[in-house]
Image: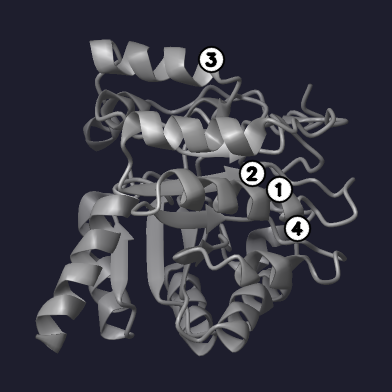
Amino acid sequence: MSTIEPLKNTPRARKPRWLRVKAPGSAEFSETRRLMRGLRLNTVCEEAACPNIGECWAKRHATIMILGDICTRACAFCNIATGRPRAIDPLEPENTAAAVAEMGLAHVVITSVDRDDLPDGGAGQFVRVIERIRACSPATTIEVLTPDFRHKEGALEEVVAARPDVFNHNLETVPRLYPAIRPGARYFHSLKILARVKELDPAMFTKSGIMVGLGEERAEVCQVMDDMRSAEIDFLTIGQYLQPTPRHAEVARYVPPDEFEGYGKTGRAKGFLLVAATPLTRSSYHAGDDFERLRAARRDESS
């Protein structure tokens, strides 16, 4: 059970029309859920209460969350349960690879809970999952969305050495809001992780994202973009924060679509190779399509 303390008991504001999505109910959605249950896999789609789950699962796309479903941290924005995690499932790499093959994914995003209880922060399990997917689905591109591996010497290097196609680690919000929103993390440590990935493998694509609507100012968002570019981050995602329960941080503001368009234009002008900035954008939302468009553009440039 989460250890997040209630912040306020005020009623949640009604979502604007641009954030309303259809309830999931397609046959493909049900098939995806059965597949995940049958293989004993967790998904961030479910655990984080993602608003895009109906659309993505209808397309047989799911973001698999390894290392269990209990996090050792309690971020004020996150719906994943906090507590003492269970032992790592030794079959998880094999089952993850089986799910990727069954869904026929051209691109897969693998994420995890924070595992501060493990000596390597779970890095070894990321490596095993990457290796099994490569063995079973060699054509599938792999994106990892990792924790910060804080105080876990060598963990980051181990994951980078496994050569995922995209290394993603989210900054989540502007530095001023870290104490309230992401108290177990440090902004500049997260930034240094992504800079370090480029030092280890300059050819590896790096990616990060933030939420807006938590009380940040536009100037702060632009500064985060500049910090990201200084760390040579390639891909940027910006989406609207949605309060998962009354016990989590409140939505300070619903950011309208035209402001997201402005963030997108600013990000592209700053030199990001890919920018996804819409109210419903999440780290893995359309990640495969975006990555394939980038690869196609680069092929055209080289031909």
Q: CA distance from mark 2 to mark 1?
A: 10 Å
**Labels 2 & 1 near each other (Cβ < 8 A):** yes
What residue would you read off at disc 4? 179
**Labels 3 & 2 near each other (Cβ < 8 A):** no
Q: CA distance from mark 3 to mark 2?
A: 17 Å
220 to 55, vertically: above or below: below
Residue 40 percent across, percent down from the top left: 61, 20
Badge 1 amino acid: Gln
What residue would you read off at disc 2? 112
Q: Give the number of the mark in front: 3 or 2.
A: 3
Residue 162 percent across, percent down from the top left: 60, 65
Residue 290 percent across, percent down from the top left: 26, 59
- Horizontal side of residue 216 vs 266, given as left or right: right
Dividing the image into 4 quarters, which one contains the N terminus?
A: top right
Looking at the rendered structure, which numbered label has been put on residue 125?
1
Q: Residues within 10 Å of mark 1 (few under 14, many from 20)?
A: many
Tell me what residue is drawn at x 56 percent, y 52 percent.
130
Dividing the image into 4 quarters, which one contains the C terminus?
A: bottom left
| Residue 243 visible | no
- Horizontal side of residue 299 vs 20, given as left or right: left
Badge 3 amino acid: Arg
Between disc 3 and disc 2, whose residue precedes?
3
> Residue reaching furthest front?
135
Numbered disc total: 4
Between disc 3 and disc 4, whose residue precedes?
3
